[in-house]
Amino acid sequence: MTKKIAVLGAGSWGSTLASVLIENGHDVTLYTNVVEQAAELNEEHTNEQYMPGFKYSEKLRATTDLEEALTDTDAILFVVPTKVTRLVAKQVKEVLAKLKQRPLVIHASKGLEIGTHKRISEIIHEELTDQYCSSIVVLSGPSHAEEVARHDITLITAASEEEKAAKQVQDMFTNNYLRIYTNTDVVGVETGAAFKNVIAIGAGILHGLGYGDDAKAALMTRGLAEVARLGMAYGASPLTFMGLSGVGDLIVTCTSVHSRNWRCGDQLGQGKPLDEVIEDMGMVIEGINTAKAAYDLSREEHIEMPITEAIYNVLYNKADIKEEISSLMTRDSKSEVIGKRK
Ligand SMILES: NC(=O)C1=CN([C@@H]2O[C@H](COP(=O)(O)OP(=O)(O)OC[C@H]3O[C@@H](n4cnc5c(N)ncnc54)[C@H](O)[C@@H]3O)[C@@H](O)[C@H]2O)C=CC1
Ligand SMILES: O=C(CO)COP(=O)(O)O
């Protein structure tokens, strides 16, 4: 059944998911806060800064007017960088209060809020409350906009505490190149999504320094052990980290040339200063902020996350990368524990 859907955020992922929804027969309005980008999408049907060379359907309408995007909408899809999620949610609440609407809310962002360490669904729920949002569903998993846009096969997860809402989102997005699995472990799915970006920066660093495949496999495996350790402390199921939003997304982000987080690490490993990496990327590198949130959280909760701490030191304390790797390699010998150490 055709749904009216407002997609908030016209970066690479927002514009690609908007395209998928249009191909699936839905009525989509794409909201951006940049006037020139809306004009380019409406007139040229392109989004050169974020999806160079990609041509969008003429059915895709972009607007900078949030009220226009939200009027009569059945669902809202948030796909903005984590750091602006709260701001955008506050703006959405004002409009929904005026329109007296209570749509289904979906989000596809990956990160944690610096300071509060809140997950994205928590931020959105805190702002919209049950009054302006019928349910929240998280869309996550190994998926790069560049591949979904060319209809490569992609499998992702729709997670919600309310299974019915997750199933609705599964129906909305499923087609012959995009397959969606439902899940009820929202904490596990969002934790895996946020922290894999930090580990991917580490994988990029190893590549940039010329380390081999053994080192990368070690980083991914022990990195996932840290992510799972933290997630389980918040009630996530350890099995979720074996799934698409866990190991699946970790693999793709630690190995794909499309990954902004991996590319950031690769350039750092080759000696490029962080501020230049950020400037040249021109797109969000979520793992940088998440590294800070994860480091703070691991300290507060007394959860051992040595790889995350090393990456935090490189990003925030200008630590020498080789010295951080040496410190990791010379830690006391351990047993291979995934959960919290006694
Ligand atoms: N690009 C990808 O393949 C994937 C990205 N994601 C996640 O999706 C989220 C968004 O990522 P991308 O689209 O890749 O980012 P991007 O860097 O390509 O684009 C970000 C977009 O957000 C917009 N924006 C910034 N502040 C805004 C505001 N206040 N109001 C409205 N729009 C605003 C920018 O104008 C830009 O269009 C991130 O959390 C990312 O981790 C998840 C899966 C795949
Ligand atoms: O989440 C992603 C792939 O699943 C996108 O990763 P990057 O933000 O590193 O490009």
Image: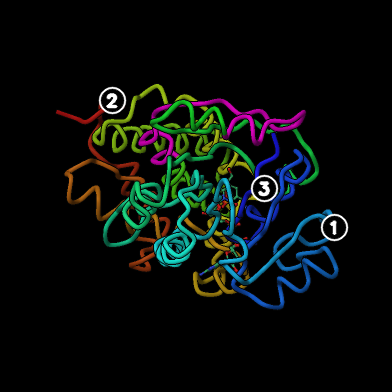
The first of marks 2 and 3 along the sequence is 3
Question: CA gap, disc 2 to disc 3?
Answer: 38 Å
Q: Residue at x 35, y 32 (%)?
A: 228
Q: Is residue 35 left or right of residue 127?
A: right
Question: CA gap, disc 2 to disc 1?
Answer: 52 Å
Which quarter of the figure is the C terminus placed in?
Answer: top left
**Residue 225 in which image quadrant:** top left
Task: Identify the residue at the far left of this view.
Answer: 342
Q: How many marks?
A: 3
Q: Type of residue at label 1?
A: Glu
Which disc is residue 337 wearing? 2
Residue stretch in magenta: 169-192
Task: Identify the residue at the far top of this view.
Answer: 239
Which quarter of the figure is the N terminus placed in?
Answer: top right
In the displayed structure, 52 sits above or below 16; it is: below
| Most foreground residue, 97 or 34 | 97
User: Pointer 2 and pointer 1: residues touching (CB < 8 Å)?
Assistant: no
Mark 2 vs mark 1: give the one in front.
Answer: 1
Residue 182 is covered by the magenta coloring: yes
In the rendering, at what x and y percent does residue 76 appear? 54, 51
The first of marks 3 and 1 along the sequence is 3
| Most foreground residue, 52 or 18 | 18
Q: Type of residue at label 2?
A: Val
Q: Residue at x 78, y 71 (%)?
A: 40
Q: Type of residue at label 3?
A: Leu
User: Pointer 3 and pointer 1: residues touching (CB < 8 Å)?
Assistant: no
Q: Residue at x 56, y 59 (%)?
A: 264
In terms of secondary structure, where does tag 1 sit?
loop
Residue tagged 1: 58
| Most foreground residue, 318 or 2 | 2
